[in-house]
Each structure stands twice: as structure tokens, then as C-alpha cells.
């Protein structure tokens, strides 16, 4: 991939806070590839661009990467090999969640299930706790943690498709670090 420094994504806009009619393409990334600051990348059509953010950001499915010409690349969370964990009631769910949290594993809560990355040791432990574990392929969007901000906007600049100089703040009294 040739270094095309003229095609740089320097701002991230949270899902639903960028003009979808200005979408110039998509970039599909696995979870581990969605937390970056600066790196050469290729969009899904093979076009090179430089991700060049002021700080590392956890990109979420649907976020928009703003390009210099005012167009955007939509971030797509790639399907990954995951384990979906089914529990028997809330007490069991709490016990399973405690064991996963005790191991500092990233988890995604989907309804009454928990999704984790495939790991046969952890899956065996969960089965030993009485959980049902099923292999699936799906995007991985783990919880951001207690200090990650709110909702899917974690780590984002909260830019809403308009300039910063518009008379009010978007910092909401907390940080997204």
C-alpha cells in the first residue's frame, strides 16, 4: 500500500453524528484494529489512507472517519470468531460475569448472553460453571469499562458534523480518555 499522505482521516465522528450522504466508502476492522491513533490503512475498495488522530480512539461500528475533501469512511466492525455464553437466570449470569471480569476479559453483553473472544480454556471454565457456550461469527463490540465514557461514544471527539465554534460545548462535563 503506497503512502498517500494527502488522504488523511484526522477526525472521528460518532455513529449518527456525521452526514451519511457524504459517505465515500467503508473500512472494515476487527476489534483489535479499531483502537488506533496513527497508521496507514486501506478502505474496503483498496484505497490507501492515513489514520492520523490526535490521540488513540476506540472506533465503533458506524463511526465516520472524516477525510480532507469533506467525505467520510464508515467504520464497519468485522465478523470475528466469538463464543456466545448462555446462562440459567440472573444469579448464574452474575457468577459467570464475575469470573470473566476477574480475568479482565473484554465482554459484550447482548440481551441475556455474554460474548467473548474464542479461548478454549475460558470456554471450558464457563462450561464447568454450567453455562452453555456456542461458537459464533459476529462483530465484537465489548463494553467500554467504567471509565470509558458513555455509550458508543467512548473515546470520540463528539463532533457532530459542524464546526467547533458554534457557541456551546460538547464536553458534557466529563472526559473520554
Image (tube, rainbow, N blue to C red):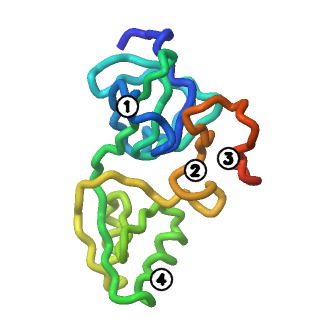
For the residue pair 176 and 127, the one nearer the viewer reads as 176
Q: Nearer the viewer, mark 3 or mark 4?
A: 3
Q: Tell me: residue 86, above or below residue 154.
A: below
Q: Earlier in the sequence, mark 3 or mark 4?
A: 4
Badge 2 marks a residue whose secondary structure is: loop
Going 51% across and 42% down the picture, which residue do you hit? 17
Residue 172: x and y in percent read 72, 52
Badge 1 marks a residue whose secondary structure is: helix
Instruction: State left or right for residue 98 relative to residue 29.
Output: right
Q: Nearer the viewer, mark 4 or mark 2?
A: 2
Q: CA distance from mark 3 to mark 4?
A: 28 Å
Picture quarter containing residue 43? top left
- Residue 177, which numbered label? 3
Check disc 1 and report the residue beneath it: 21
Check disc 4 and report the residue beneath it: 94
For the residue pair 130 and 154, the one nearer the viewer reads as 154
Q: Nearer the viewer, mark 1 or mark 2?
A: 1
Picture quarter containing residue 4? top left
- Residue 154, which numbered label? 2
Q: Earlier in the sequence, mark 4 or mark 2?
A: 4
Going 30% across and 67% down the picture, which residue do you hit? 84
Query: How many marks overall?
Result: 4
Q: CA distance from mark 4 to mark 2?
A: 25 Å
Q: Nearer the viewer, mark 4 or mark 1?
A: 1
Amino acid at each position: 500500500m503506497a503512502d498517500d499522505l494527502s488522504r488523511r482521516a484526522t477526525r472521528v465522528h460518532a455513529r449518527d453524528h456525521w452526514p451519511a450522504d457524504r459517505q465515500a466508502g467503508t473500512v472494515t476492522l476487527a476489534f483489535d484494529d479499531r483502537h488506533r491513533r496513527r497508521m496507514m490503512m486501506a478502505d474496503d475498495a483498496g484505497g490507501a489512507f492515513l489514520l492520523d488522530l490526535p490521540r488513540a480512539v476506540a472506533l465503533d461500528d458506524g463511526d465516520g472517519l472524516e477525510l480532507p475533501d469533506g467525505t467520510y469512511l464508515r467504520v464497519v466492525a468485522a465478523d470475528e470468531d466469538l463464543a456466545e455464553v448462555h446462562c440459567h437466570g440472573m444469579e448464574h449470569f452474575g457468577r459467570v460475569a464475575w469470573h470473566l471480569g476477574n480475568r479482565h476479559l473484554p465482554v459484550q453483553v447482548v440481551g441475556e448472553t455474554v460474548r467473548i473472544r474464542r479461548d478454549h480454556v475460558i470456554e471450558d471454565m464457563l462450561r464447568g460453571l454450567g453455562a452453555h457456550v456456542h461458537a459464533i461469527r459476529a462483530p465484537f463490540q465489548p463494553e467500554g469499562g467504567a471509565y470509558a465514557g458513555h455509550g458508543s461514544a467512548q473515546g470520540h471527539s463528539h463532533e457532530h458534523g459542524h464546526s467547533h465554534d458554534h457557541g456551546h460545548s460538547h464536553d458534557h462535563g466529563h472526559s473520554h480518555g
